[in-house]
Each structure stands twice: as C-alpha cells, then as structure tokens.
Image (cartoon, rainbow, N blue to C red):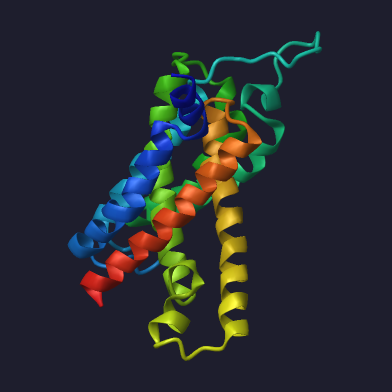
Amino acid sequence: MTRLTSLADLVRIEDLALAGWVVIGLPVLALVAGPVDDPFFPSSPLVGLLYLAGFAGAIVCVVSRPLEPIAGSDSGELAAGRLGVPGALGPFVGGLMLIGGGAMAAIGGSTETGFAIALFAGVFGFMLPGPRLSPAVRRALVVPYTFAASTAFDAWIAQLGGAFGVVGPLGAGFTADVRTILASLGLTTLFTIVFYAMLVFAPRQIAEREGSALAWVVRYLLFVVALTFGAGWLRTFTG
C-alpha cells in the first residue's frame, strides 16, 4: 500500500491522461482533422474547439480558486499565494495568451481578443466573484488545456523537423552525423522543458499546489516518452 501511495504521489491521473492524449489522441486527431497547420493559430474547427475548451477551463480554474493566505503574512491574501506558487503566474499567463489567441482565431474571432481575455483572467481573474471549486474539480478543468497545449507543441516541434528533434536525422536511415543528432536532441529537449514548465506545470500548480521536485521530473519524463512514441505512431499512419 505504501508503494502504491508513493507511486500515486509521483504520477497523478492527469499525467496518465496527458500521456494517453499524446500517444493516442494526437494521432487520431491528425487522422480526423489533418495535421495542425499552425501550432497556435490552427485553421481546423475541431482543433479550434479543443483550444477553446482548454482556454475556458483554465479561466474557470483561476476564477474558482479559493484564497490562500501566504504563510507569515498579516496583510491578507496575495495574488501569488492565491495562484499556487509565485513563479507560476507569469508562465501561465503567457501560455494562456497563446492558447486563447488560437482559440479565438479558430472560431473566427480576433487573436487580440484572446490575448486580452487571457491577460485579464490571468492577472485579475482571482478577484472575480464566483463559486470556489474543490482542487479535484480545478485539476479536471485544466486537463483540456494541457491537451490543447500539447497539440500546439507537437505541431510546433513537427515544423522544426520532427517530434523530439530526431525524426529527420533518424528517419533518413541514420545518415546524419552524431553531432547533428545530439544538437537536435539538446535543442528540442530545451524546448520541451520550457513548454512543460509554461503549459503543464504552471496551470497544474495554479489548480492545486502539489508535487515534489522528484514527482515533476518523473512527470516530465513520462511526457517526453509519450511524445516520442506518439509521434512515431503518427508518422506510421500519415507518412
């Protein structure tokens, strides 16, 4: 039982859902709606609906988060304490603007509208009146957002030469030299770390402050493995 509890602390259901989406959902989405032509401004209505669902869920998550007084402070609640961790707000707002702009563009609106809504919601959303939802509900609300974000990221990486940076070199019969492959891997790994911190870690922390450093490393590695295998299956069926 202790081992199972420890494993549950390391990997939560949202991590398994995200991995499943990357491995199964993304290839199926590509077969149904076609490859995502633009990571953050997709033309496919189906992808646009996914972005819109993620955008709306993330905003509701912010608005519905109860106040959290900062330990040792007598001045009341502060935005940083309210949103989980001080370092999560900036990355969260940046990612929300990207997904929000794409969501608005996909349904015929202006990207500027999406940017403005995301900026307002991210900075001032916690001040708005509304029901305060439980951590479990808030965690569920950001799941579509992470799905939309991983869809955008997968398309972006594909435009850079393939998921995890090795599609081009390894897919060409190992004709690329080792330094090219290592450089590609290093650059794409850096991209995945920035993406994960901005579009997965930050909203998850805003939904509920949880997880040790080890837990988040394990969750990130699970995402990378899923991204690699998911991209391989996609190439098999779509060429």
Residue 171 in picture, x, y percent from top left: 39, 82
- Against 67, is 208 above or below? below
Q: Quadrant of residue 205?
A: top right
Residue at the (32%, 54%) spot, across then down: 23
As drawn, which residue projects farthest toward the top?
A: 74
Q: 232 or 104: nearer the eye?
A: 232
Residue 113 visible in the displayed image: no
Q: Residue at x 28, y 65 (%)?
A: 233
**Residue 88 in view here:** yes
Specify whether 165 is left or right of 230: right
Count of numbered circles on the image:
0
Quadrant hosting residue 53: top left
Q: Is residue 154 above or below residue 86?
A: below
Q: Residue at x 56, y 79 (%)?
A: 181
Q: Is residue 37 left or right of residue 208?
A: left
Figure quadrant of the N terminus: top left
Question: What residue is at 70 percent from the left and 37 percent from the top?
Answer: 87
- Indicate the position of residue 78 as horizontal and vertical percent values: 71, 20
Nearer-the-camera pick, 221 or 115: 221
Which percent across, then down, holds residue 73? 80, 12
Q: Is residue 238 above or below residue 93?
A: below
202 horizontally vs 3: left or right: right
For the view shown, which residue lies furthest in the bottom direction? 175
- Residue 44: x percent and y percent? 27, 61
